[in-house]
Image (cartoon, coloured by chain):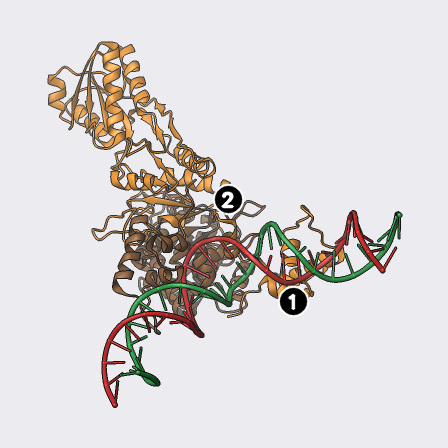
Chain colours: A orange, B brown, C green, D red
DNA sequence: TCAAGATGCTAATTCGAATTATTACAGGGT
DNA sequence: ACCCTGTAATAATTCGAATTAGCATCTTGA
């Protein structure tokens, strides 16, 4: 196991001091630093011949920053299920990290006794990175609070309620996206709406329901909220347009309606609100909106960079894009 | 901008010296080192409250062991293409890293001028990790050689030829898998074979072709090698069983034959050899073998652990599993 | 009571590179 | 001879944690 060369070794070979090697290596000319051309050449020649490369570890120790960004997820980031919901976020994160010249540290070691990963466990390694991006439908409130109080630089993907202070995030503007869908449906004559989904728990859920309530109120139309799909219930209530949090719920609803001999969107319009935590059949061409997941990943890393540089608390919502589909009429 | 805590800070808070903090942190008991239980408890309490974690950079500078494993890929690890070939390897890597209590460092920062990532660039960060898993169809020979000469612990996923020395790897036993397929075909009466694919370049390619040559020689049957698919050419030569490196090539061949009115496997048997760098139609139920990708990922991390602990050079081939399919008869 | 042995902790050094402060030496002017 | 000014290089320090040698203090046993 050949030991790695150090600047001291290079210095010896070139007959100069370690400091000189460092100065040559970094091509320093400023602030009263001068190296004679022939000395510089001699050092460079030794470096070339030996193939010496500065040890990045020692370098980072001095520079106080290691250009490592952490990525924390409560689940495995390389999921076994195909077409995973979180994948595009990670693509965006990786892309932007590459642009920023940073490496990504996946906190695979963070698992608590229960099996689920925790940010703060006995041996939390969260501080290994300069900062951290958090990914997950819902984040542990106490974890968030601890991150804030400990002043650990981080950015959440997805809007988060305050947790003992404002949480830096890059989210999707669900209220606006849902309002847009309702607007479109109202313009087509719908006036009896239903929202299918939890509508609470995770912020992403609550935001959608809030957008729904605001929209129906603004238009003065009727809007009910049911946590679970029930086609009969919806039809009995005279609903003509259904918005489902979950894509798979929307697809199931369409299939159920058609099985019943109903036409979609003729008799019933179905709109999906972008959430896809479960795989959905891809033969149903749902109208609704898509979440700019890749872009959110990119922006999160950019926001983290800002946090690191300026100590700010960025909060940003990105617009969702309308998906035309064929289930609105 | 909250400064990162140091052992010195912890020491101050606990009213002890930096050395004591280090000793407590590493739970040292040996060699005349003793810390009073109450002192230990006091230090641990401060550590717990502050969430202090040793700076990996500084730690790494001194000894070797960060519990950070690097993953180097020449492409992005979160690919946008669906049904990606590399995903299962990464699942296995993550799984095993989690078991081993290690974090994964993705070398996203490594990009050379050309755009393709390089292990050794101006400022190589490969040594940030304790060791590294390399993933890719073919690896740069000079990169491998440099890894060896610099004594950087690593394991390649996929067998690699010597590069100035034996390369540690966890690969798939392609020769055996191909021989097995030929054996089965010979048992069914085939005696005129064709191998479709490069058969050279990457080791994985060469290994398959080698297995093919050995098998046909052993059985005394006829075997030709053509780099690209040409149904006419194969039929003219009287071939009854075709082995294709690429899954998609095999699928294309089956479709082409059927279009021609031929029966598969009645008139022609088609066997695929596990390589899937391009998406393949999934409506063709090919016979052949599958690569134990997830397992290879797991084993690679285990092998890397062995390298780190014993300085060995593990070389291991895992068996591929037969995929029955319906294109052999 | 005093040496021998435990016990509990700390000062000082190390790792490799970057940086600051400082020294050494030339030549020019007075 | 003396001071001054450039020029060229080095000594010394820094980063944060690990480690070793060693210094106090406290027990024992004879």
Residue at 35% in and 55% down: B93
Residue B252: numbered disc: none
Q: Is residue A83 above or below residue B293?
A: above
Chain to which mark 1 belongs = A
**Residue A120 at what x, y percent from top left?**
29, 48
Residue at 23% in and 26% down: A244
Res A239 visible: yes
**Residue A271 at what x, y percent from top left?**
26, 23
Is A263 or A242 nearer to us in this picture?
A: A242
Reading the image, the residue beneath label 2 is: A101
Closer to the N terminus: mark 2 or mark 1?
1
Reading the image, the residue beneath label 1 is: A12
Res B269 visible: no
Chain to which mark 2 belongs = A
Is B265 or C10 nearer to us in this picture?
A: C10
**Residue A18 at what x, y percent from top left?**
62, 61
**Residue A310 at what x, y percent from top left?**
46, 35
Q: For mark 1, give the secondary structure.
A: helix
Q: Nearer the viewer, mark 2 or mark 1?
A: 1
| Residues marked 2 and 1 touching at CB (< 8 Å) | no
Q: Is residue B103 above or below residue A319?
A: below
Is A276 or A200 nearer to us in this picture?
A: A200
Q: In the figure, residue B136 lies in which quadrant?
A: bottom left
């Amino acid at each position: 196991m050949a030991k790695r060369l150090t600047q001291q070794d290079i210095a010896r070979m070139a007959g100069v001091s370690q400091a000189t090697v460092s100065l040559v290596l970094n091509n320093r000319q400023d602030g009263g630093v001068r190296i004679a051309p022939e000395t510089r050449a001699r050092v460079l020649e030794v470096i070339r011949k030996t193939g010496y490369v500065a040890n990045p570890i020692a370098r980072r120790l001095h520079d106080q920053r290691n250009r490592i960004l952490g990525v924390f997820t409560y689940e495995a980031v390389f999921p076994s299920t195909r077409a995973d919901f979180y994948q595009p976020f990670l693509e965006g994160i990786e892309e932007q990290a590459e642009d920023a010249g940073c490496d990504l540290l996946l906190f695979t070691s963070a698992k608590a006794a229960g099996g689920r990963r925790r940010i703060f466990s006995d041996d939390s390694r969260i501080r290994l990175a300069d900062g951290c991006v958090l990914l997950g439908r819902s984040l542990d409130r106490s974890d968030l609070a601890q991150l804030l109080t400990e002043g650990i630089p981080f950015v959440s993907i997805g809007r988060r309620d305050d947790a003992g202070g404002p949480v830096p995030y890059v989210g999707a503007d669900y209220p606006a996206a849902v309002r847009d869908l309702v607007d479109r449906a109202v313009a087509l004559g719908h006036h009896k709406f239903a929202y299918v989904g939890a509508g609470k728990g995770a912020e992403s859920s609550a935001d959608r329901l809030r957008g729904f309530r605001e929209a129906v109120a603004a238009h003065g139309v009727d809007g009910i909220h049911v946590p679970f799909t029930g086609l009969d219930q919806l039809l009995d209530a005279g609903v003509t347009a259904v918005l489902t949090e979950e894509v798979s719920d929307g697809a199931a609803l369409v299939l159920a309606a058609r099985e019943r001999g109903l036409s979609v969107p003729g008799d019933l319009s179905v709109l999906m609100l972008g959430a896809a935590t479960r795989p959905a059949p891809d033969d149903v061409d749902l109208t609704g909106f898509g979440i700019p997941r890749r872009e959110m990943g990119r922006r999160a890393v950019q926001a983290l960079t800002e946090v690191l540089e300026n100590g700010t608390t960025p909060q940003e919502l990105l617009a969702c894009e309308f998906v035309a589909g064929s289930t609105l009429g």
